[in-house]
Amino acid sequence: NILLKVIIFILYLVPTYQQFPRLCVTQQALRTKECCPVWEGDGSACGAGSGRGSCEDVKISEQPDGPQYPFSGLDDREKWPLVFYNRTCQCAGNFMGFNCGDCKFGYFGDNCNERRVSLRRNIFHLTRAERNRLISYLNLAKQTISREYVVATGTYREMENGSNPMFADVSVYDVFVWMHYYVSRNALLGGPGNVWRNVDFGHWAPAFPPWHRVYLLHWEHEIRKLTGDMTFSIPYWDWRDAQDCEVCTDELMGARSPQNPNLISPSSVFSSWKVLCSQAEEYSNRGVLCDARNEGPLRRNPGNHNQNIVERLPTSADVEFTLSLPNYDTGAMDRTANMSFRNTLEGFGDPQTGLGSSSRLGMHASLHVFMNGSMSSVQGSANDPIFMLHHAFVDSIYEQWLRRHKPSPSQYPESNAPIGHNGDYHMPPFIPLHRNKEYFISSKDLGYEYSYLLDASKFLSDFNKLFLLMLIFLFYFILSCQLFSFTVTLPRRKSWKNFFALPEKQPLIWNNETEASHHNYQTTM
């Protein structure tokens, strides 16, 4: 425990990269609406002195939103991030980050010019040491206060337009818990109970796969920065045909407590975790934002859920049918009529027909309900570390669909999608800014791959090429040895004629000594 506290204290001094940036929540920054922090590498805003980026006006799409949200100017997420900032860092080349001090996804190095592809693997294929490292990284992120980022606990109006900043310190892990809460929360229209529920900037509509893709990429990046382990990748849980929560063991995400089946086993480190932003109804009744306070222990009781909503976990056939749907999304928020890949993947379309008229939930949503605890609330679901494993596999299905159907960019709705979901809309609450349609692309373009999606034929092709190169190398090596041998013995020859002549005594068969030597050579090679 003492060692862990020392490590946490040291890592508190290491900057991380997520939002709201602490340097952008001062009265001056909020009043001027400018979030262009200095990059420590050269002391200039956005690293402009080194050509990394510059402070620019935020450009917002003027495409109309759908009719589902009939208000304007009431929610801080509208036209993100204009309520808080109208000037932010715009980074050049492969640079990224709130101050352009980071690299785009898939790039590494001081100058962000090293391209690498990370591999996300099945959690059951990790070694014991890798699993232990995963658990320790998660717990470290939960225990380490984010030095660079804070979370909003009040609306911009409650902050008196920046005069009274309302932000709270949370851990690196809980920054992401808050983010998932913030993107999915109800819209506060003013006063207790006065909320609009039919709104979600990251679910129920086209942005669901891209938003969660960016979310996982940032979370993966934060763990790397926190631990210094640049090889870290999020593992996934392949839940196809699972009969129970296979990752709910004390060696992984925590077993069921024998004292209370709704809690985590005391033998798991996750039994000590506390949740936040999990009481959506209370916030709505009070008409306030989550205050990021401790709201009790992590809860989970997998399988003891409402069987009328979720009958079973998804099967391989469910996934295959979902992948077969050619239409990405209709752009509508009507989950009963939206027969599309996205709607079925998210869990609102029947995974056998694609129709959304069923009262049951499937695919992605069924896992959340099945867990029967903290993960079953949309706004508080990221409190459970299973969330990451689950959504990594959901992202892999999204990736399969992209590769199979190769959609044109025009398939992503540019207009009239529910608010927050148009192609050019900036994803709340990310700073740095990301547009939805920028992540309607393959994971390969973002620097990561899934182990079970690796192309076997490509692997064999690459192996054959490597084998051929080895044969060519071996041939030239033997030839070079022969030429070297001839060159060394050349002065002893009487003439060039003798040089090209065959030796007088040439054995017709290998003797035992020569044969043994030959086999050893091959074995060595």
Image (tube, rainbow, N blue to C red):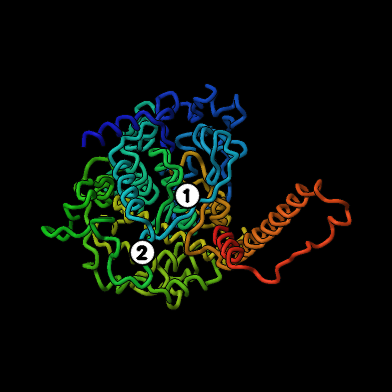
Q: Which numbered circle lies on residue 365?
A: 2
Q: Secondary structure at mark 1?
A: helix
Q: Nearer the viewer, residue 415 or 73?
A: 415
Q: Nearer the viewer, residue 35 or 398?
A: 398
Q: Is residue 400 left or right of residue 361?
A: right
- At 21% from the left and 52% from the top, the residue drawn is 268
Amino acid under disc 1? Val
- At 36% from the left and 67% from the top, the residue drawn is 239
In the figure, residue 76 lies in which quadrant?
A: top left
Residue 444, position in %: x, y?
Answer: 56, 55
Residue behind mark 1? 214
Q: Is residue 158 left or right of residue 421?
A: left
Amino acid under disc 2? Ala
Q: Seen from this angle, which residue lies furthest left?
A: 259
Q: CA distance from mark 2 to mark 1?
A: 19 Å
Residue 455, position in %: x, y?
Answer: 56, 65
Q: Is residue 366 left or right of residue 325?
A: left
In the figure, residue 316 lies in which quadrant?
A: bottom left
Mark 2 vs mark 1: which is more N-terminal? 1
Q: Nearer the viewer, residue 301 or 224?
A: 224
Q: Secondary structure at mark 2?
A: helix
